[in-house]
């Protein structure tokens, strides 16, 4: 059973993502730790670097959740994840890690910026299921 605080934090993340132009929000015990705007994986990487250990036990709200961002949520030791849209692969990553997740819409895959193919971050991580390796790969390739 999902703890009530996590459900409350997911509701808060849903509200913020629905009423602002943020792409990511980190909520812990009803408090907003950070909100970020931006495209791709950069906002969640920035939140991880900024908050470090404070992200542990938080709920992450991400506008679009693919495998890359799901692995980063596991890496950050999130207690819950809410996303407006997510892939089955991303939800599977959360389930394997024992992290409750909610999404409003399932999508087959995360598209690239042009909308004509797979997101490059998803391609980069196609051969790994390790949150630590995913973090290293994404950090190195985002410089």
Image: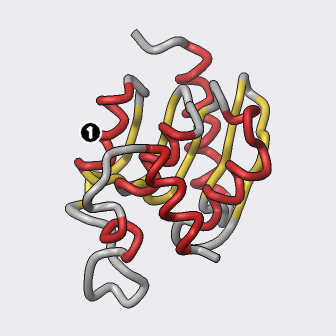
Point out residue 108 in the picture as x, y percentages from the top left corner. 20, 62
59 versus 29 height, above or below: below
Quarter-of-image position of residue 61: top right
Q: Is residue 8 left or right of residue 102?
A: right
Say which residue appears at 56% left-offset and 31% top-offset.
77
Residue 105 image position (x, y, % from top left): 31, 52
Depth order, front residue of 121/14: 121
Residue on which the image places disc 1: 92
> Is 18 placed left or right of 89 in the picture?
right
Q: Position of residue 111 (x, y in %)?
A: 33, 75
Q: Residue at x 35, y 74 (%)?
A: 119
* Colour mapping: secondary structure
Quarter holding the C terminus is: bottom right
Q: In which quadrant will I find the N terminus?
A: top left
SS label for mark 1? helix
Q: Position of residue 101 (x, y in %)?
A: 41, 34
Question: Residue at image x 26%, y 39%?
Answer: 92
115 is higher (above) or lower (below) than 13: below
Q: Residue at 41% across / 57% down in the picture?
A: 68
Q: Is residue 63 above or below residue 112?
A: above
Q: Residues within 10 Å of mark 1 (few under 14, many from 20)?
A: some
Q: As drawn, is 96 to the left or to the right of 121? A: left
Total of numbered circles in the picture? 1
Q: Is residue 40 above or below residue 115?
A: above
């Amino acid at each position: 059973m999902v703890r009530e605080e996590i459900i409350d934090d997911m509701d808060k993340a849903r509200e913020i993502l629905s009423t602002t132009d943020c792409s990511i929000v980190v909520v812990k015990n009803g408090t907003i730790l950070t909100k970020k705007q931006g495209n791709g994986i950069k906002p969640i990487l920035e939140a991880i670097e900024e908050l470090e250990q404070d992200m542990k036990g938080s709920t992450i709200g991400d506008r679009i959740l693919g495998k890359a961002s799901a692995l980063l949520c596991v890496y950050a030791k999130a207690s819950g994840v809410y996303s407006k849209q997510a892939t089955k692969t991303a939800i599977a990553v959360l389930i394997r890690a024992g992290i409750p997740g909610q999404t409003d819409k399932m999508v087959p895959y995360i598209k690239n910026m042009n909308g004509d193919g797979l997101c490059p971050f998803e391609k980069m991580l196609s051969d790994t299921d390790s949150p630590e390796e995913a973090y290293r790969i994404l950090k190195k390739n985002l410089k």
